Image (tube, grey):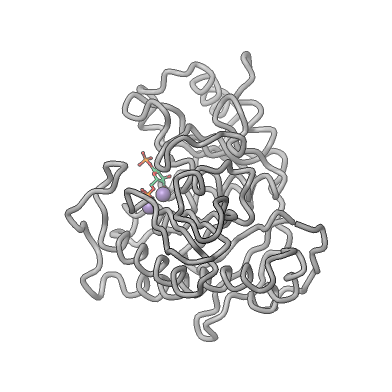
Amino acid sequence: MENSRIDLPIGVTLDRFIKSNENEYIGAVGAFSQLLRDIALAAKVVNRELNKAGLIDIMGNAGIYNSGGDEQKKLDLLANTRFIRALSKGGEVCGIISEENESFIDLENNGKYIVAIDPLDGSSNIDVNVSVGTIFSIYKRKSDFGKPLSEFDFLQKGRDQKAAGYILFGPSSMLVYTTGNGVNGFTYEPSLGEFILSNINITCSQNGSIYSINEGLSKSIKDYKIINYLDFCKESGYTARYIGSLVADFHRNLLKGGVYLYPPTNKFPNGKLRLMFEANALAFVIEQAGGKARNGEMDILDIQPTTIHQTTPLYIGSSDMVDKIEMPSL
Ligand code: AHG
Ligand code: MN
Ligand code: MN
């Protein structure tokens, strides 16, 4: 990637922003831009479906489970279908992995890109009309064109991401993404059907006073560093905020300064969040915004994945807060 971002004013459309910054993606011609547009289109479709939830029969459980053992919601499946369909059509993407699919999808074309996606994040919140999201990562294909894809194409380190971001379906919907050249946010204007640049070059403050963790899990957290850090947060009079939709919790902390923690627990000894569908994309975004993402020992982006659905502990947000978690004595 070249360091040649063109700064555009608030109010320009996502399309125009992508077009103006096309020179960032050397060698990709228009393919990479088209891929970003496809993601935005799927986001609009999912946004439309989510706005109807409650009026038509798309809430509740679908009665089947994904490979992580979570019962899939009807909207998990619907969002999954919409994103896979949008990504399959253009020919830019040759392979997809999704939290909702056991194994990788080989689209059997000559596309240059691989996409990893959590189509609906925080889906347990959908039935109660609370913010949810979509998380995506884009990588380059590794195998030769014309050959079938293998896990080798997908098991790439987060450091190798070419772009990553998320869509937050909230009071207003937002698309936030990075191509390795800063982070920008676009707010959806439903009457125009456009994402509009609203947050230019987002930076996460070095320190903050919000901590986000499911404290109901406290008794099953064994890592004394986390227990000490939670005590430190309380002694410091920090504010606890936890929505239970990673995208929403992450977005708040990105903008306001704060830290999100999902440590190992008795139930999830390696953490609950998925490296390839959740942690990597947000780690790329937070690093680009000046923050940090760690698993307690190393940067999330440096973890070599060994399986598509593997999980990781996640500590992500303002850099000083993330650093403090790993300090042996607070
Ligand atoms: P998903 O809906 O994609 O399965 O993700 C749920 C994740 C994440 O969004 C959230 O932060 C976390 O699960 C909440 O877990 P707890 O209910 O254990 O706090
Ligand atoms: Mn998720
Ligand atoms: Mn999900």
Q: Nearer the viewer, residue 235 or 230?
A: 230
Looking at the image, the residue that sits furthest to the front is: 146
Q: Measured along the vertical axis of the image, is residue 214 above or below residue 21?
A: above
Q: Is residue 311 left or right of residue 255?
A: left
- Measured from the top left, where is residue 126 in percent x and y? 33, 59
- Quick check: which quadrant has ligand 1? top left
Q: In this view, does 172 lie to the left or right of 322?
A: left
Q: Is residue 26 left or right of residue 40?
A: right
Looking at the image, the residue that sits furthest to the left is: 63
In the picture, the quarter occupied by the C terminus is: top right
Q: Nearer the viewer, residue 44 or 162?
A: 162
Looking at the image, the residue that sits furthest to the top is: 329
Q: Nearer the viewer, residue 318 or 70?
A: 70
Q: Residue at (59%, 24%) from the top-left corner?
A: 297
Quadrant of residue 45 within the rendered picture: bottom left
Q: Measured along the vertical axis of the image, is residue 320 above or below residue 140?
A: above
Quadrant of residue 293 within the rendered picture: top right
Q: Residue at (66%, 72%) from the top-left corner?
A: 197
Q: Residue at (54%, 51%) from the top-left corner?
A: 143
Q: Residue at (28%, 48%) from the top-left corner?
A: 66
- Measured from the top left, where is residue 250 in percent x and y? 54, 48
Quadrant of residue 48 within the rendered picture: bottom left
Q: Measured along the vertical axis of the image, is residue 122 above or below residue 10?
A: above
In the picture, the quarter occupied by the N terminus is: bottom right
Q: How many labels does the image show?
A: 0
- Measured from the top left, where is residue 124 in percent x and y? 31, 52
- Measured from the top left, where is residue 287 in percent x and y? 68, 44
